[in-house]
Image (spheres, grey):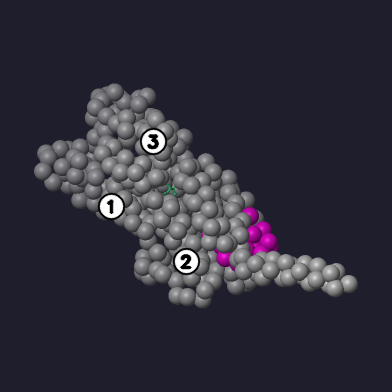
Amino acid sequence: MKKILAIVLSMLMVCACFTVHAEEAHKVGISMPTRDLQRWNQDGEYMQRMFEEAGYVVDLQYAGNDVQTQLSQIENMIANGAEVLVIAAIEGSSLGEALDMAAEYGIPVIAYDRLLMESDAVSFYATFDNYKVGTVQGTYIKDTLDLDNAEGPFNLEITAGDPGDNNALFFYQGAIDVLAPYIESGKLVVVSGQTEFEQVATPLWSTATAQSRAENILSTYYNDGTVLDAWLCSNDSTALGVTNALVANYTGAYPIVTGQDCDVANTKNMIAGLQSMSVFKDTRTLAAQVVHMVTQIFNGEEVDVNDRETYNNGVIVVPSFLCEPVFADANNYEEILIESGYYTPDQLQ
Ligand code: BGC
């Protein structure tokens, strides 16, 4: 009898341990836009690993760049007990219903890299300094062409990002603010005449769309030997499309091409001289910052932010933590990408 009692008791204690453990393991829902782009796979993977190492349970979903899918994935996360949501939106303004539901259940929401727009249910925003990304790209063109001293004029084309992504406008504006004085003075000439954000935007940041627009511009404006000096591209997926078009359709001296993300294909292009620079945004840093924010939320601590002014989502100014973007090119990629363990040398072969 005593023996049976002891066994039952020890079983109860094991159960109690599990219950306490289950109560302690907070559930985090992570909604990522797409697996199509390298960076979101890395962001998701790093966050999952870091959250799990910190003792959280993770529900990670990719929405295949489909807004309805993202909406229902987030609603399912809430229904399945997520206690905090980390969301990188496909379309910043389209998740209202899911965000309302999160607010109703008192679930904090962190906008991940892309701001969630038109909602007061956004608790925090973790991103890189998006305006600075554009500034770094514009400054690279300005310095490389030596716009303050060289006679010029130089020819430029522009490819920006997805109009549904608030970041796209920040990247574009950061670069244009550096280049606008030279465009106005005539030292930089946008031969296609396409300078407005709406004219140069690339829905869903699609490589194929960026490529076909670039092919069009090259055949219409540069087929007669007109020299192209630089192509400002807001990120690597669009730079890849522009580079494909240049390689196939442009025979003059290869122009400056900018980018952002240091994707594998683009880093290889930098090494091969087909893309001039990129902007490295270490997704490990961003993921770690978000894990830190979530831990602060659950501990009832004040959440670290370093910007309370810039990111107005149309309803509120969202308290933000901005990580630092880093200039990258063929000269420093080994140090920042390989020595830091971001890529192995094999990946860049
Ligand atoms: C991100 C960029 C990325 C782009 C396309 C933006 O919101 O900030 O890093 O290249 O989306 O996925």
Name the mark on residue 345.
Answer: 3
Q: Is residue 149 visible?
A: yes
Residue identified by numbered label 1: 135
Q: Quadrant of residue 158?
A: top left
Marks 2 and 1, Cα distance to the nearest angstrom? 27 Å
In the rendered structure, does residue 246 fall within the stretch colored magenta? no
Which quadrant is the N terminus positioned in? bottom right
Marks 3 and 2, Cα distance to the nearest angstrom? 33 Å
For discs 3 and 2, the disc positioned in front in the rendered view: 3
Position of residue 186 relative to residue 297, above or below, is above
Q: Residue furthest front?
A: 2
Instruction: Report helix, strand or loop for mark 2.
Output: helix
Instruction: Specify start and end residues of the magenta stretch as a single range.
Output: 73-87
In the rendered structure, does residue 74 fall within the stretch colored magenta? yes
Residue type beneath disc 3: Pro
Label 1 neighbourhood size at 10 Å, few (<14), some (14-19), many (20+)?
A: many
Residue identified by numbered label 2: 293
Residue type beneath disc 1: Thr
Instruction: Report helix, strand or loop for mark 1.
Output: helix
